[in-house]
Amino acid sequence: MESTSYESDLEETLANRERLRSNPNLLYWYEQLYRYQFAHEPGLDSAKILEIGSGTSPLKQFVPNVTTSDVLALDYLDLVFDCHRIRDLAEIPDRSVDVITMTNVLHHLKDPLAFLRDATAKLVPGGRVYFAEPFFSVLSYPMYRLLHHEPVDFNIERPVLNRVHGPLSTSNQAMPHMIFFSRPEWLAELGDVYDLKQTDVRYFSGISYPLTGGISRRFPMPAPLYKLVHSIDQALVRRLPRVLASFFVGTLVASK
């Protein structure tokens, strides 16, 4: 990884964090995402939770007991490490974590399947991995493909990033979607470490994320109106996910 790319990603992460925290509608979107994602997680307030890719994430505002981490050396994090080396992480004992969570992180990883495999070393038997990633519906495909700055490449032979310039600046938004929707044989490679029969995939939001302006912009929509639009958006997405959804929320359960 080139130092200039790392430094650029570090600066961009700090700027993105400030933009997110100054955008109340975007914060509300994240709060609703976390509520939806952890709706069936027992004892969340007392669980041992590790978040991967916490650089910009506001999760700790809503779930204070989370242990934050990132590959970028940010002074507000609990841990700094490369998640591809999670198996060797001495700071977290093996078989001690109830939940590993990440938001828009898998598509930035050099080898997401390798990470998901090694992450089970830290999970208790039956522990869960939660993640939120782009979903390519009729509505969202052109938005991700044409309007978003991150690459979308469905013409890959394996779910890996062949060249990594930086943890934030390198990605392929298509990888998680392919693993969980169009290339089941890739997910099946994890069948010895996860109980794949318990894999859960749900859909979250369509237009309500871009209506916040996202990280790079801010639209001046009054909060009460935005909350109403978000509720309607989510109700429609639940009925027509393949047409309207922009994100999917997944859960993997470690084998016992």
Image (cartoon, rainbow, N blue to C red):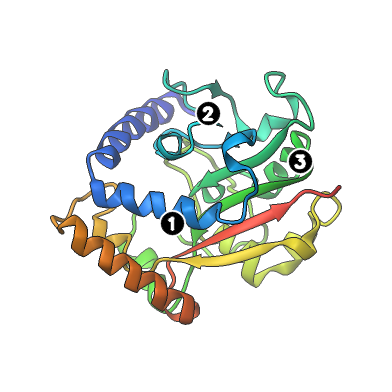
Q: Kindly identify the residue that appears in the image at 43 percent across and 28 percent down.
A: 6
Amino acid type at mark 3: Thr
Residue at 47%, 23% (x, y): give it: 77
Which residue matches tag 2?
A: 71
**Does the residue at mark 1 contact the one at mark 3 (Cβ under 8 Å)?**
no
The mark that comes first in sequence, 2 or 3, is: 2
State whether residue 99 is above or below residue 155: above
- Under circle 2, the secondary element is loop
Q: Which residue is mark 3?
A: 120
Picture coordinates of residue 128, whole percent (x, y): 69, 48
The three-letter amino acid code for the residue at tag 1 is Pro
The answer for how far apart the CA atoms under marks 2 and 3 are is 19 Å
Side of 255 relative to 83 (left or right): right
Q: Secondary structure at mark 1?
A: loop
Q: Which mark is residue 151?
A: 1
Is there any visible trace of residue 12 in the rendered image?
yes
Task: Give how far across and how far down residue 245 sits, in percent.
Answer: 44, 71
